[in-house]
C-alpha cells in the first residue's frame, strides 16, 4: 500500500481552526503504518465526546462544536477518517473498504484507550461508527446520530442511488456539486479549508471511493458486516439520540429506522432541525450543541 500525506503547509491559517494536531498510528492488513489525525479541546477529565465526520469533509466540520462543547466542560475530540483531513491517504481506491475503515477506526479507539465515550456520528461517521459501537459496546456510554444511517442492501433514495452510480465511474471529485447542493452559504475561504487536505487529484482516491462503499445495493461486499452490526444494535440499550436536518436528501428517513430498531433510542428527545442540510454541523452547530449537552448530562452551571 502506498500512502500520501498532505503537507502541513496546506493547513496553515485556516479560518476558525487553531487546534494542535494529534496523531495515532494504526496498521493496515498488509502491515503498512497509517497515521490518523484528531483534534481535541476541553478538560481531560471531562465527559468524553468523540465526533466522526463523513465524506468528503474532515474534522474541520466539527470546529465550532469542539470549541463549544469544550467550553461547556466536555473533553471534545474530533477525528479524521483515513483518506480525509490530516490523516494519511492510501493512493488506490481499492485500498478503501468498509471493513478496512471499521478496522482503522477501531484501532484508533483502542490505541487511545477511549472508554465511556459519547459518539457523535454524521454521514460515514455513522456508517462506520455504528458498526464500531455494535462490535465494541462497552466502550460507549451513548450515541448521537446526525444525518446518518447503516444501510444493509435494501435500496435507498433515488438521490443516493444516483450518487453511487455516478461515483463508480468518477476519476475526480465533484466539489462544485457538493458546494452548490449541500454546503449552503459558505464563504469561499471556508470552502477552501474543506479542500485543504486535497492539493491534487492524487490525494482524492478515498473520497472518490467512499460513495461506492455505501451498502445500498444487495451485492455490496459490506452488506454482511452491516447486517451483523444491526443484529447487535437491536439489543443496544444505552441512550441513542437522533439529530437530523429536515433538508437532507441523503439521510432522510434513517432517523426513524434508528429510533425504531435500537432500544436505547426509545423515549429520547429526538430532534429534526428546520432548514438543516446534510452537513448539519457547519451551519447549525449552535442548535446541535445544547441538545448534546443535555444528552450528556453536562452541568451548564459548572
Image (spheres, helix red, strand yellow):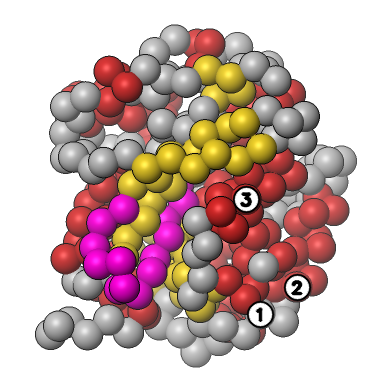
Residue 236's disc number = 1
Q: Which residue is mark 3?
A: 107
Q: Is residue 133 left or right of residue 190?
A: right
Q: Is residue 184 above or below residue 125?
A: above
Seen at 70% across and 20% down, the residue is 1
Q: Nearer the viewer, residue 234 or 78?
A: 78
> Compared with residue 181, is residue 72 higher up or lower down, i.e. above or below?
below
- Left or right of 76 on screen, residue 33: right
What residue range appears in magenta? 40-53
**Residue 15 x/y as whole percent:** 16, 33
CA gap, disc 3 to disc 2? 20 Å
SS type, badge 3: helix
142 part of magenta stretch:
no
Label 2 SS: helix
Instruction: Assess whether residue 41 is covered by the magenta stretch.
Output: yes
Q: Which mark is residue 265?
A: none
Q: Residue furthest bottom?
A: 267
Distance from label 1 to label 3 (Cα)? 21 Å
Whether the residues at callouts 1 and 3 have beta carbons within 8 Å, the answer is no
Quarter of the rendering containing residue 75: bottom left
As displayed, is residue 280 above or below residue 166?
A: below
Circle 2 Cα neighbour tier, 10 Å, few/some/many (<14 / 14–19 / ≥20): some
Residue placed under numbered mark 2 in the picture: 232
Task: Please identify the quadrant where the C terminus is shown.
Answer: bottom left
Callout 1 crowding tier (Cα within 10 Å): few <14, some 14–19, many ≥20: some
Q: Quote the CA–CA distance across marks 1 and 2.
A: 7 Å
Assess whether mark 2 and mark 1 are in contact (beta carbons under 8 angstroms). Answer: yes
For marks 3 and 2, give the one nearer the viewer: 3
Amino acid at each position: 500500500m502506498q500512502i500520501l500525506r498532505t503537507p502541513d503547509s496546506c493547513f496553515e491559517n485556516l479560518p476558525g481552526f487553531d487546534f494542535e494536531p494529534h496523531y495515532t498510528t494504526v496498521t493496515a492488513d498488509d502491515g503498512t503504518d497509517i497515521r490518523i489525525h484528531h483534534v481535541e479541546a476541553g478538560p481531560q477529565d471531562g465527559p468524553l465526546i468523540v465526533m466522526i465526520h463523513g465524506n468528503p469533509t474532515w474534522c474541520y466540520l466539527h470546529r465550532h462544536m469542539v470549541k463549544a462543547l469544550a467550553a461547556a466542560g466536555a473533553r471534545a475530540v474530533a477525528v479524521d477518517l483515513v483518506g480525509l483531513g490530516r490523516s494519511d491517504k492510501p493512493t488506490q481506491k481499492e485500498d478503501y473498504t468498509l471493513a478496512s475503515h471499521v478496522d482503522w477506526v477501531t484501532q484508533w479507539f483502542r490505541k487511545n484507550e477511549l472508554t465511556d465515550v459519547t459518539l457523535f456520528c454524521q454521514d460515514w461517521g455513522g456508517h462506520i461508527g455504528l458498526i464500531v459501537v455494535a462490535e465494541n459496546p462497552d466502550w460507549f456510554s451513548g450515541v448521537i446520530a446526525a444525518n446518518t444511517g447503516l444501510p444493509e442492501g435494501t435500496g435507498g433514495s433515488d438521490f443516493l442511488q444516483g450518487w453511487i452510480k455516478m461515483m463508480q465511474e468518477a476519476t475526480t471529485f465533484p466539489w462544485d456539486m457538493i458546494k452548490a447542493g449541500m454546503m449552503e452559504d459558505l464563504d469561499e475561504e471556508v470552502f477552501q479549508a474543506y479542500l485543504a487536505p486535497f492539493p491534487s487529484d492524487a490525494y482524492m482516491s478515498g473520497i472518490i471511493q467512499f460513495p461506492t462503499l455505501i451498502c445500498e445495493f444487495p451485492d455490496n461486499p459490506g452488506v454482511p458486516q452491516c447486517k451483523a452490526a444491526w443484529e447487535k444494535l437491536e439489543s443496544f440499550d444505552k441512550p441513542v439520540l437522533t439529530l437530523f436536518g429536515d433538508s437532507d436528501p441523503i439521510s432522510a428517513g434513517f432517523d426513524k429506522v434508528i429510533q425504531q430498531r435500537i432500544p436505547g433510542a426509545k423515549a429520547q428527545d429526538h430532534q429534526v432541525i428546520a432548514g438543516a442540510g446534510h452537513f448539519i454541523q457547519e451551519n447549525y452547530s449552535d442548535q446541535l450543541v445544547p441538545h448534546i449537552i443535555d444528552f450528556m448530562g453536562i452541568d451548564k452551571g459548572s
